[in-house]
Amino acid sequence: MNKTILVAVTACMLLTAGCEGNNMAPVPATPKWKGAPYRLALDTKETKPNPAGITIPAVKWTANPEVLERRAALVIRFDVTGGKKDTPVMNQMVMAPTDIPGAEGALTADYMNVTDKELAQYLGAYCLKGKVKLTVALARSSLNPRPTDAELDAKRLSDWVPVEVDFKNPHPKC
């Protein structure tokens, strides 16, 4: 009887010893993707001038495959110094959302053409011309057309990418 109790106690001790194991938390794995979910690049090929007077290079993206979005809006910030109007000027424009399928791609030529036309109208209304400094970023499609800085930062999908473009103002009164 003593041997049976001794064997049973030893078996229980061995079983519980195996359950205790290493109680330390495992080291978290380093993320495969660091930074914003989308990375933008501007096309470096020479682009055909847009009749609107400004041509933004094509915007290409690479996305984190774990957090893909279906739609996004292009946000453009620009430097408005040098304009001839004394009224306050907005320094950013949010385009309508567009489809961004897959982990890599580029905004369509039609979308970029509409962007060029709308930006040219806006800059032309304030009599800007010459070199214009822009920064572009992608944001979630739910972004308000006139977002606050806090909302824009919360819904931005990419970092800002700077570009400088020529603007030939077609407005006759400037």
Image (spheres, helix red, strand yellow):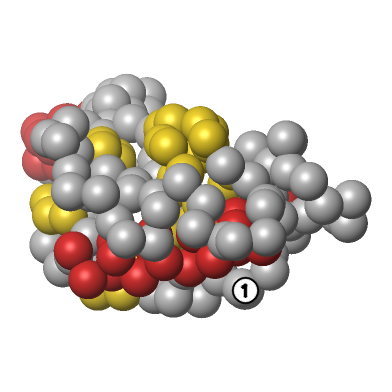
Crowdedness near tag 1: few (<14), some (14–19) or many (≥20) residues, C-alpha within 10 Å: few
Q: State the image coordinates of residue 123 (x, y, percent, origin top left).
A: 60, 55
Left or right: 149 in relation to 76:
right
- Residue ID at (41%, 66%): 117
Left or right: 93 in relation to 54:
right
Residue type, numbered disc 1: Asn
Q: State the image coordinates of residue 48 (x, y, percent, origin top left).
A: 18, 48
Looking at the image, can residue 62 be seen? no
Q: The N terminus lies in which quarter of the figure?
A: top left
Count numbered badges in the picture.
1
Q: State the image coordinates of residue 20 (x, y, percent, origin top left).
A: 29, 32
Which sits in the foreground, 172 or 24?
172
- Residue ID at (25%, 37%): 41
Looking at the image, can residue 164 be seen? yes
In this view, the residue farthest toward the front is 172
Residue 99, picture quadrant: bottom left
Relative to 59, residue 139 above or below: below
- Residue ID at (29%, 65%): 113
Which element type, helix, strand or loop, lies under badge 1? loop
Identify residue for label 1: 144
Left or right: 8 in relation to 82:
left
Residue 146, picture quadrant: bottom right
Q: State the image coordinates of residue 64 (x, y, percent, origin top left).
A: 23, 47
Relative to 80, residue 3 above or below: above
- Residue ID at (25%, 49%): 49
Which sits in the foreground, 47 or 153?
47
Relative to 154, residue 24 above or below: above
Left or right: 75 in relation to 97:
right
Which sits in the foreground, 49 or 89?
49
